[in-house]
Structure formats: structure tokens, C-alpha cells
Image (tube, rainbow, N blue to C red):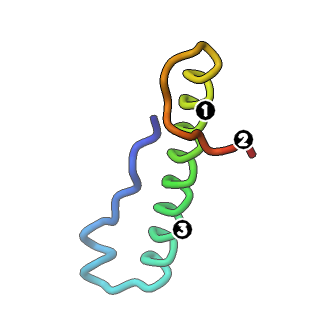
Amino acid sequence: MPAKPVLTVEDVALGESAALDRHNSAIEAWGDGMAKQIGRLCRAAADVGLPHPDCPAAE
């Protein structure tokens, strides 16, 4: 599992808008990747007959 991106104290203290934008983009990409992993695990569980909630469709 990839580590969640962390905003540095320096970026916050300096108010670097470009750094904050990069961090927001990194968080979005991280969350999208995690959602895809959860979907793959859900579908794999369904494939072997384990009980599961409705799984998201593969992209």
C-alpha cells in the first residue's frame, strides 16, 4: 500500500500555493489508487464466492 502523501511543515509555514496544489493532487491520486485497490479486492472476493457488498466495476 502506498504511503499517504504528507504536507511538510515548511510548505504550510511558507504558504506555498504551488506546494499546496501539488499536495492536493497527490492526495487525490493516492485516494483514487486506494479506491481501485479496494475494488480489485472486492471483485477477487466475489470471484471465489466470499460474501461481499456490491463491488465497484473495473475500469
State the residue at coordinates (47%, 71%): 24
Disc 1 and disc 3 in contact, CB within 8 angstroms: no
- The outermost residue toward the top is 48
Rendered position, 2 above or below 51: below
State how far apart marks 1 and 3 are (Cα): 23 Å
The disc placed on residue 40 is: 1
Graded by Cα atoms within 10 Å as few (under 14), some (14 to 19) or many (20 or more), the crowding at tag 3 reads few
Looking at the picture, which amino acid does disc 3 mark? Ser
Q: Which residue is mark 2?
A: 58
Graded by Cα atoms within 10 Å as few (under 14), some (14 to 19) or many (20 or more), the crowding at tag 2 reads few
State the residue at coordinates (46%, 61%): 27
Q: Quadrant of residue 46?
A: top right
Which of 39 and 8 lies nearest the eye of the viewer?
Answer: 39
Residue at disc 2, secondary structure: loop
State the residue at coordinates (39%, 50%): 4
Q: Which residue is mark 3?
A: 25
Residue at disc 1, secondary structure: helix
Question: Measured from the top left, where is residue 1 in percent x and y?
Answer: 45, 34
Q: Quadrant of residue 10?
A: bottom left
Looking at the picture, which amino acid does disc 1 mark? Arg
